Amino acid sequence: MIKLYGIPNCDTVKKARSWLASHDIAFEFHDFKKQGLSAEVVKRWLQQATQEQLVNRKGLTWRGLPEEQKQAISSDAAALELMLEKTSVIKRPLLEQDGKLLHLGFDDAAYRKIFNL
C-alpha cells in the first residue's frame, strides 16, 4: 500500500494528493499533526535518507527555531528528536510503500517514473 505522509494544509501535499487521485493510485494519507509519528518510522526514514534531506531547512518551522537549536541538529539523533517534537519541520510529502521511502517532496516527473506513467 502506498502511504503519503504530510499535513493536509500544505500546498505541496495537496498537489501530491491531487496527482495520486487523478491517476487513480490508491493511497493512505497519514497526517503528521493528527496522527503523530513514531520514533520507529522516523528511524526507518533516516536509514534511507539523510537528515539533511528529511529536515526542511527552508520552511517556516525551521526558520522559527532559535539559532542554537538549529546548530544542534548535526546528528541523526538530534534530527530524530526535532522531527518527533516538531513534525512540520519534516520535508513533505513523504511517499512510502511497504516501509520503503519512494520520494521526498512532490515532483510530477518523479511520480510518473515511480508509477511507470
Image: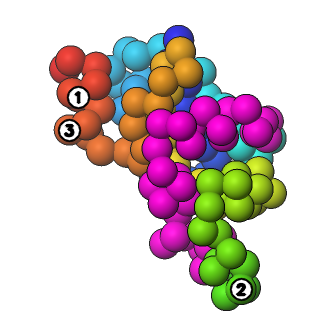
Q: Position of residue 28 (x, y in %)?
A: 59, 21
**Labels 3 and 2: the sequence-earlier one:** 2
The image quadrant where one finds the C terminus is top left
Which numbered circle lies on residue 112? 1
Q: Is residue 58 left or right of residue 7?
A: left
Q: Which residue is mark 3?
A: 109
Q: Indicate the secondary structure of the residue bearing disc 3.
A: helix
Amino acid at the residue labelled 2: Glu
Image marks 1 and 2: residues in contact by CB distance under 8 Å: no
> What separation in Å lies between label 1 and label 2 (alpha carbons)?
40 Å
Q: Residue at x 42, y 48 (%)?
A: 105
Q: Residue at x 39, y 37 (%)?
A: 103
Q: Residue at x 28, y 20 (%)?
A: 115
Residue 111 vertical position relative to residue 83 in the rendered view, above or below: above
**Magenta part mainly helix, strand or loop?**
helix
Amino acid at the residue labelled 1: Arg
Foreground: disc 3 or disc 2 = 2
Q: Position of residue 82 (x, y in %)?
A: 73, 60
| Magenta span | 35-64
Foreground: disc 1 or disc 2 = 2
Work out whether residue 48 or residue 32 is closer to the camera in this orientation and state it. Answer: 48
Amino acid at the residue labelled 3: Ala
Image marks 3 and 1: residues in contact by CB distance under 8 Å: yes
Residue 59 seen from this side: yes
Q: Indicate the secondary structure of the residue bearing disc 2.
A: helix
Q: Which residue is mark 2?
A: 68
Examine the structure image and report whether residue 39 is included in the region drawn in magenta. yes
Q: Is residue 86 left or right of residue 110?
A: right
